[in-house]
Image: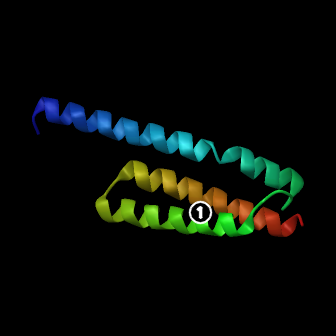
Amino acid sequence: MEPNTQAATNVIQAIGFAAGALTTISFVPQVIRTWRCGREGLSIPMLFIFGGGVTLWLVYGVLTGSTPMVVANALTGAQVIAIAVLSRRRK
């Protein structure tokens, strides 16, 4: 790769990781709230629809070889699973 092309690729990857970090971190407060309060105020249908979307983005990231997309959606998917489990345990 040419130096400019490699630099552009690095910037694009950094943007992808930053976007993934922000969207993944944004879900942490919901995990904490579900830990403390259980299912109260949580839309279970939204959680499953969102989880389906995250799963499809994860598959898309794997198929396209997008490391930022795979990492972000794997972490977000883990949070969705944690919220689902916590909401069942803390009714």
Q: Viewed as shown, does residue 14 lie left or right of 29?
A: left
- Image height check: is 41 above or below 59? above
Q: Viewed as shown, does residue 18 lie left or right of 11?
A: right
- Image height check: is 18 above or below 46? above
Q: What residue do we see at 44% from left, 61% from top? A: 57
Q: What residue do we see at 71% from left, 61% from top? A: 82
The picture places residue 51, in percent across and down from the top left corner, at 59, 65
Q: Where is the N terminus found, in terms of image quarters?
A: top left
User: Dot 1 lies on which element?
Assistant: helix
- Image height check: is 22 above or below 83? above
The picture places residue 46, in percent across and down from the top left corner, at 67, 64
Check disc 1: other Cα within 10 Å, few if <14, some if 14-19, many if 20+: some
User: What is the total number of numbered labels drawn onto the structure image?
Assistant: 1
Q: Nearer the viewer, residue 10 or 30?
A: 30
The picture places residue 25, in percent across and down from the top left corner, at 61, 42
* Quarter of image, res 61: bottom left
- Image height check: is 85 above or below 72? below
Q: What residue do we see at 81% from left, 64% from top? A: 87
Q: Viewed as shown, does residue 85 lie left or right of 51?
A: right
Q: What residue do we see at 58% from left, 54% from top? A: 76
The kind of residue on which mark 1 rests is Phe
The picture places residue 20, in percent across and down from the top left corner, at 48, 45
Residue that carries the numbered disc 1 in the rendered image: 50
Q: Where is the C terminus found, in terms of image quarters?
A: bottom right
Which residue is at the far left? 2
**In this figure, which colouring scheme has been used for the structure?**
rainbow
